[in-house]
Image: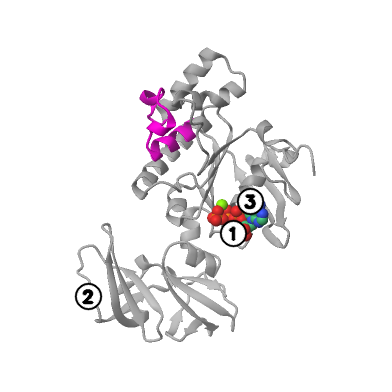
Amino acid sequence: MPGCCAEVRAEGVKLLADGVSKRYGPVVALEPVRLEVRAGELLTLLGPSGSGKTTLLQIICGLVEPDQGRIFVDGRDQTDTPVHQRDVGLVFQNYALFPHLTVGENVGFPLRMRSVSASETKRRVQDALDMVQLGHLARRFPRELSGGQQQRVALARCFVYQPSVILMDEPLGALDKKLREHMQIEIKRLHRATGATIMYVTHDQEEALALSDRICLMNHARIEQIGTPGEIYERPLTAFAADFIGISTALRGRILGGMIETPEGRFHLPPEAVGVEGSDALLVIRPERLALGQGTNVIAGTVTESVYAGAETRLLFRLATGTDAVLRLPIGMPPPPIGAAVTATWEPGAAVMVPL
Ligand SMILES: Nc1ncnc2c1ncn2[C@@H]1O[C@H](COP(=O)(O)OP(=O)(O)OP(=O)(O)O)[C@@H](O)[C@H]1O
Ligand SMILES: [Mg+2]
């Protein structure tokens, strides 16, 4: 319904995408989705390439018109409001800086567009540049900066006019891993300092886990699951969610007599799992929940690889059925050699069951 949406404002919802959808000819870019973003939260749209993340973000900022549905900000219908009149800041991967303007002039640009006075602009530009630790580079031109510094200028340019909603589409996509991690911390800090509501698009699950208050997981133009990083990692609701976030050992089977029967054996279900007798399900065990040894549930296999990753070592082994399994070795334990026979166990409550 166009106009004011009092119910939404009352609940502390900053932004509501209410039943928005988009098609391009025969391609469904976005099925009708409903998404609420709470005031002050950092919500990530996470999903594989082509799942509709950019489409949803562009509908929210007004660059793309939805086929159906409405966009509300602070309970006000913004669907027909042009991009530049929305209280929304944008940072895109290729949101190029103006090459002929200095860093300071680039950051001041949105303020000039809003007719902010020269003295006020100067102060706010300096504050914004200090916030991203580039106060000393205000006179340089973009070509005289590294990629990471340019990205920080783009962030400062977005934060400088204090939009209450900031949309970022893969803003760190072009940076190397170390710089990405540094910038993730920077974005978290800016988020905390400004209290802005941020929607952040990425297809990198580690980035989503590290940054988000909540993750909206997308797949095939739909929302697959919405939850905190912990909820999505610990309690994936679908096989896709379990597979897309983190790594795990996945055993397919059928629920029979309160157990799950799989080609790898018959296993106890997690106590809270509500499975329908006779239905197909996937048992998902995270590497840190699986340990070498014997116990209630046991799988056996042959070591195929051990992967040292500094903070942890993962042991990969293959079960007789050909299914691959992975566990995290305790700190300091030397990995068994490749080809060694191993058994591994998990507590029933440490696994997650998802319907198939
Ligand atoms: N302007 C367009 N014309 C035609 N098809 C489009 C257009 N924009 C997007 N699509 C299609 O809509 C679907 C969703 O695209 P979208 O850009 O939203 O995906 P995405 O999740 O952002 O992917 P990526 O991670 O690769 O950026 C894709 O199949 C894409 O090819
Ligand atoms: Mg995209």
Point out the image quarter for the N terminus.
top right
Relative image position of residue 324 (x, y in whole percent) = 39, 77
The reply to whether dot 3 and dot 2 touch (C-beta < 8 Å) is no
Is residue 216 in view from this perspective?
A: no
For residue 90, which quarter of the picture? top right
Relative image position of residue 242 (x, y in whole percent) = 49, 66
Identify which residue, 148 or 66, lies in the foreground: 148
Q: From the Cβ of disc 3, is ligand 1 less than 8 Å away?
A: yes
> Residue 51 has which mark?
1
> Residue 68 has which mark?
none
> Residue 55 has which mark?
3
Dot 3 or dot 2, earlier in sequence: 3
Q: From which residue to which does the magenta span run? A: 132-156
Q: CA distance from mark 3 to mark 1?
A: 9 Å
The reply to whether dot 3 and dot 1 touch (C-beta < 8 Å) is no
The reply to whether dot 1 and dot 2 touch (C-beta < 8 Å) is no
Q: From the Cβ of disc 1, is ligand 1 less than 8 Å away?
A: yes
Considering the numbered disc 2 on the image, is that residue within a helix, a strand or a loop?
Answer: loop
Q: What's the residue type where badge 2 is placed?
A: Pro
Point out the image quarter for the C terminus.
bottom right
The colouring scheme, among rainbow, by chain, secondary structure or one colour, is one colour
Residue sitting at x 44%, y 47% = 174
Identify which residue, 317 or 95, lies in the foreground: 95
Instruction: State the residue position of label 2.
Output: 336
Residue sitting at x 64%, y 41% = 61
Considering the numbered disc 1 on the image, is that residue within a helix, a strand or a loop?
Answer: loop
Between marks 1 and 2 in the image, the one whose residue lies nearer the viewer? 1
Q: What's the residue type where badge 1 is placed?
A: Ser
Q: What crowding class fits label 2: few (fewer than 14 Cα within 10 Å), some (14-19), or many (20 or more)? A: some
Is residue 85 in view from this perspective?
A: yes
